[in-house]
Amino acid sequence: MIRDLILKNRSYRRFYQEVSIELATLRELVDLARLSPSAGNTQPLKYILSCDPKKNALIFPHLAWAGYLKDWSGPCEKERPSAYIIILGDTEIKQSFGCDHGIAAQSILLGTTEKNLGGCIIGSRQREGLRKALKIPHRCEILLVLALGKSKETVVIETVGPTGDIRYWRNSNDIHHVPKRALDDIIL
Amino acid sequence: MIRDLILKNRSYRRFYQEVSIELATLRELVDLARLSPSAGNTQPLKYILSCDPKKNALIFPHLAWAGYLKDWSGPCEKERPSAYIIILGDTEIKQSFGCDHGIAAQSILLGTTEKNLGGCIIGSRQREGLRKALKIPHRCEILLVLALGKSKETVVIETVGPTGDIRYWRNSNDIHHVPKRALDDIIL
């Protein structure tokens, strides 16, 4: 059931770093994005794959993690992603990318979840540092970084309370709690 | 398998209009979007549901269909969508919506496909006409319209040829052909 997969697909930010992901697996995941809808069928997205420790180490310093957890600056060594898929927008094909990268990211993450792996969509990144580190061509806009690995976290969905606060938090056992708005609050 | 669902989820634009979709089904589909990722967990999206013929008739005239099919202005009566989910961005929560609506749309369409229904993401719409017709509050930006129904089309995936032309076409039997870029052409 797609609902089970969507429920299982939480944003995971700590991983069993020693569990590697094959390049062939990343290619399978990108193929899911390739077969997903694209506005006007223009398919302007390009992908950079990384699953070896050296390349991963070039990417990691340019990412920002879990903005609401002020006393946590990101996963420590041994808990970092073992792979990344970077989603780029090719400006030689199109100047703006609508929400194509959202469609692609969701397909990739559902595929990741089905493989009993986990991940997180990272929109907050130092673009120019990442561009330099990976020699990303200037014609490509860096849209999203998907951090992937064998997840090491427990994530629990809560309902947004009367204050409307949507910030996630971690309890003393490092359980990650995520408040979601109720269905009746998002249907007009 | 998620790959089977993604392959089955094509953009369908002609439907068995007489096959209705229940409101409860639309609510289940929006719940899939609700449980999907949102940047910073801000959850700024709102949804308008329509599955009765009168409301559907208010929506249909404001949509643009299949830009590349110059001699087809959209589905005729009897082949129109039997339901819609309109995705809005609530500017009281956030001013820009990143690719949240892409993530939401893909979750909804995969859920639709699992129910043996089909749909199409429509980004091209007359916003102000639609706003007036449905009395959509000015605080909400109209992001996407998802047209849903029991699909009546055959869609075939092709590989983009050497000319790079990505425009879809229909053959004389009304089979809809969609060229997709090859995997090696989208991985840098």
Image: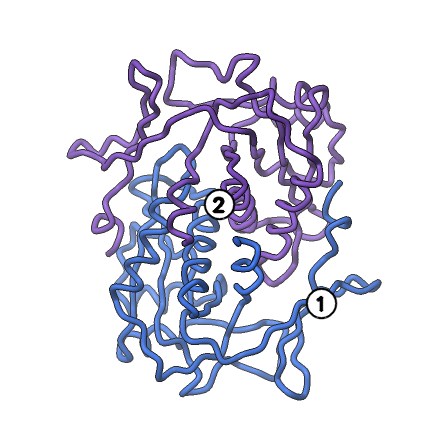
Chain colours: A blue, B purple
Q: Nearer the viewer, residue B148 or A72?
A: B148
| Residue ID for mark 2 | A99
Q: Secondary structure at mark 1?
A: strand
Q: Position of residue B10 (x, y in %)?
A: 41, 36
Q: Is residue B147 left or right of residue B7?
A: right
Q: Chain of mark 1?
A: A
- Residue at x 62% of width, y 31% of height: B84
Seen in the picture, residue B70 relative to A188 is either above or below; the reply is above
Q: Is residue A15 left or right of residue A182?
A: left
| Residue ID for mark 1 | A158
- Residue at x 31% of width, y 31% of height: B156
Q: Nearer the viewer, residue B154 or B37?
A: B154
Seen in the picture, residue B153 relative to A58 is either above or below; the reply is above
On the rendered image, what quadrant is the C terminus of chain A found in? top right
Q: Amino acid at mark 1?
A: Glu
Q: Is residue A113 left or right of residue A34?
A: right
Tell me the quarter of the picture where residue A22 sits. bottom left
Q: Residues within 10 Å of mark 2 (few under 14, many from 20)?
A: many
Q: Position of residue B144 (x, y in %)?
A: 57, 36
Give the mark nearer the N terminus: 2 vs 1: 2
How far apart, in angstroms, are the residues tagged by discs 2 and 1?
Answer: 27 Å
Q: Mark 2 and 1 residues: CB-CB less than 8 Å, in contact?
A: no
Q: Residues within 10 Å of mark 1 (few under 14, many from 20)?
A: some
